[in-house]
Amino acid sequence: MKDVEKFYAPPREGEVASAGASIVYYEKWRETKEQRLLDSLQAYNRFDCESTRGLHEWLLGLRPAGLAWFTGQATGEDEEKKQERSAKTLEHEAALERYRERERLTGAAAASLSEKERELRELAFYLLDFHRRADKPGWWEVFARRDMDEEEFLEDAECIGAMTLDPATPPRPVKKSMLFTYRYPEQEFKLKAGEDCLRADTAEPAGIIEAIDEENRILGLKVGPSRPRPPERLSIGRQGPLGGERIRPALFRFADALLDGGARYRALRDLLLREIPRRRGGETMGLQEVFRLDESYLYIQGPPGAGKTWTGARLVVELLKQKKRVGISSNSHKAIHKLLTEVESVAAAARVSFRGVKKAAAQDEETKFDGRYVQNVYTNDDAIGSGAQLLAGTVWLFSDPGLDQKLDYLFVDEAGQVALANLVAMGVAAKNIVLLGDQMQLGQPIQGVHPGRSGESVLEYLLAGRATIPADRGVFLSDSWRMHPDVCGFISDAVYDSRLQAQADNARQRLVLGPRADARLKSTGLAFVPVAHDANAQRSEEEAAVVKELYESLLAQRYVNRANENKPMRAENILVVAPYNMQVSLLKRVLPAGARVGTVDKFQGQEAEAVIISMATSSGEYLPHNIEFLCSKNRFNVAVSRARSLAVLVASPRLLEVNCTTPEQMALVNTLCWFVAAAGLPV
């Protein structure tokens, strides 16, 4: 506003001339209580208010006579879609109002209940509107992209930017659609084959991603007959949120059960009240308690390399052997498939036969799972009507009323990434709930602003800030089958309350370094390689050069695995991790072809003999996001714990001197300092 004041207002006078100066004056007033300082602030704020009114009047004077006022009303097809969305919104708001008006879940109607019960009902009420709140930022991002340029698309992991139509591959028909082939520059993205996508610059439908060849950076875009031919140069982005219309009714069923006061959904009640899991007999908490659950829940925390999937699969197979009906769910189909693969392997080895179905999308190959016992179905009705003993799918399957309380057990994998609202929505399908996950690894960012604790993941809610599950409330898998003791010791002390230990055979793992190996490398443990640089935010050529030296040296070495086998180091035995896409792209350019390079999001669940972590940012002055992102304990935990033998941190030493404004930020930076100290260097 100050930039245009010259057109309608006199020059500013007075001691305070900017927002920054006003902060300084206020702090001085707090110290001295001088009235002169307060008067200067008052004059500054008064001028701001008068300037705002002056700007309004000036703009009105510029407005052409007879120009229609903006109403926000659309026409034609857009208006029809808007009316349809509005009708659904109004219906949902009316349903919420029925609870609000009568104060059925909160207020006077709950006044006579215990404090815990009142808190439970309040939380249940907040969860009813979770999906609408969570969807809003996603739609804002879709529309915000219309004002972005190609460079910004390249940095947005929800986009594939600067694609160019491949002149060597002419469009070809695929049934009634046309398939266009595009080439794209190097970038990190989350889109995958089978996804519908939008034009990033217009938010209009672009088509369906038919295939992506990441090695050659080629993308096939299938465009339907009703859509115009796509342009020669194109950037695409993800669609807006899928919406929670089909999930919400399950949340209302849970709320109604609370009001009825019966014993329905006891497992969810226990979880939301954070009660000690209810079991039939049994005094000590262990994996066998899964089979003793009495309509309750159990959390099995699996730190890196602790065998969470291995453990979960064996529990599922034992339940199938006992003729229990079991569900498997998670946020992602990839996580579901990983557990299903292990379940089928264990079942085959144990000669346990069962029939299972996986709810998939017919047009999306990545949602399909074809196994020995588990077959795909493509509608909820087919899954529900199959009579299968094992059902697998996402929340859109298990929130279906046709499955309400039909399962004996529901296993939720990667539970740290599942929103509390989605857990409740899928949990209504089962009498017992088993959570597999680790809240100290990567979570799923939950968008929107949510009241109370309704915006947390299920594990954030359940653990309430604790790093590990208490021994009387769940099972902590305490043996890591991945990390050498010198790596595991740091992860255990810095992240897991010193409860994680390396399995004995891990001590055999080590790098066998030759006489010409880079002196900055070690056989096992942690190494800190300081690299001085300045003015770098998301990309550091200085660090990339050092990473290249370390990487090439590692390729010339050998390693010993936990089976005591001596083998040569190859690209598959090294992971290179960076927090930013710009640094990932730079590292891919400087490292040999085939190098495994990416952000921690790409590598969760993977491992290698050696891990190199490049932080890229020069100092706190150049943080592109915030301390919470770069120094995230969860992300750092995932990065370091990929290493079987050696984790190398390449970073500017000034990152250890970042100014912190809260105790939480101090704790995050302290983890970096802890690593450096554990690597044997003074901090």
Image: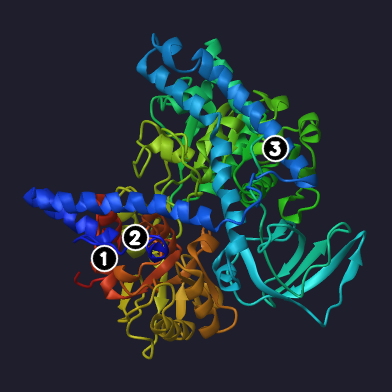
Instruction: Note whether residue 225 is visible.
Output: yes
Front in this rendered view, residue 381 or 156: 156
- Residue 380 against residue 569 in the figure, above or below: above
Front in this rendered view, residue 281 or 49: 49
Q: Position of residue 562 (x, y in %)?
A: 46, 65
> Label 2: which residue?
627
The amino acid beneath tag 1 is: Val
Determine crowd level at label 1: few under 14, some 14-19, many 20+ residues with C-alpha closer than 10 A: some
- Whole-Å distance between the Cαs marked 2 and 1? 8 Å
Q: Which mark is residue 85?
A: 3
> Label 1: which residue?
658
Mark 2 or mark 3: whose residue is earlier in sequence: 3
Judge from the rendering whether residue 555 lies leftward or rightward of residue 27; answer left or right: right
Q: Nearer the viewer, mark 2 or mark 3?
A: 3
Q: Position of residue 618 (x, y in %)?
A: 33, 75
Q: Position of residue 136 (x, y in %)?
A: 57, 44
Contact between marks 2 and 1 (CB within 8 A): the answer is yes
